[in-house]
Amino acid sequence: MSSLLDEDEFRRWRSEADRALEGARVQATASLHNWSCFLAEQAAQLAIKGFLHGIGQAPWGHDLVRLGQLAASSGTELPEDVAARLRRLSRHYVPARYPDALPGGPPGSYYGPSDSVEAVGDAEALVAFVDAAWEALGG
């Protein structure tokens, strides 16, 4: 099956997932927790899109839950803990960035250290899941 995989495309997306994840860690260290959470979401999005591109899918959009469903429909088992991480991270796509996304103030006032810890941990687990799924396919 590995001959059907697009290793270059997977690696192109996957390397950016690592950069976004490192950015999430840096932002958390700087106490910019909303940006840390957003970058953690981006890391997961880049990793799962890389997987989907690598198996010949053409993922579109930014909904991590939907991207996870696409991976599952391709035959990749999506454990409940992975699905839960996708749901949690999806919540950071808009509110972490836009001043009018939350009613009472700018995004930074709604995010704290525990949010960064959870989001970065979720992203790390999702990147590891993607890597394991890729390897299982012979990538």
Image: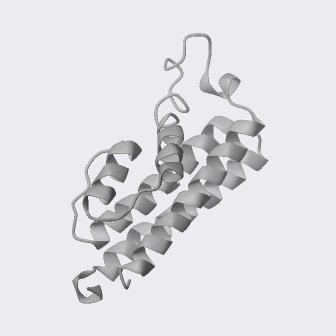
Q: Is residue 49 visible?
A: yes
The spot of residue 128 in percent (x, y) is 55, 67
From the viewer's perspective, is 87 left or right of 70?
Answer: right
The spot of residue 133 in percent (x, y) is 43, 71
| Image quadrant containing the C terminus | bottom left
The spot of residue 101 in percent (x, y) is 49, 20
Q: Which of the 4 image quadrants contains residue 136?
A: bottom left
From the viewer's perspective, is 9 left or right of 58?
Answer: right
**Numbered label tally:** 0
| Image quadrant containing the N terminus | bottom left
Q: Residue furthest bottom?
A: 3
> Is 121 in front, or is 34?
121
> Is 60 in front, or is 23?
60
The spot of residue 64 in percent (x, y) is 40, 46
> Is 55 in front, or is 20?
55
Q: Is residue 58 above or below residue 2?
A: above
Q: Is residue 62 visible?
A: no
Q: Is residue 32 above or below residue 95?
A: below
At x 46% / y 31%, what residue is drawn? 94
From the viewer's perspective, is 45 left or right of 6?
Answer: right
At x 64% / y 60%, what residue is drawn? 22
Color scheme of the displayed model: one colour
Q: Is residue 52 above or below residue 12?
A: above
Q: Which of the 4 image quadrants contains residue 3?
A: bottom left
Q: Residue furthest top?
A: 104
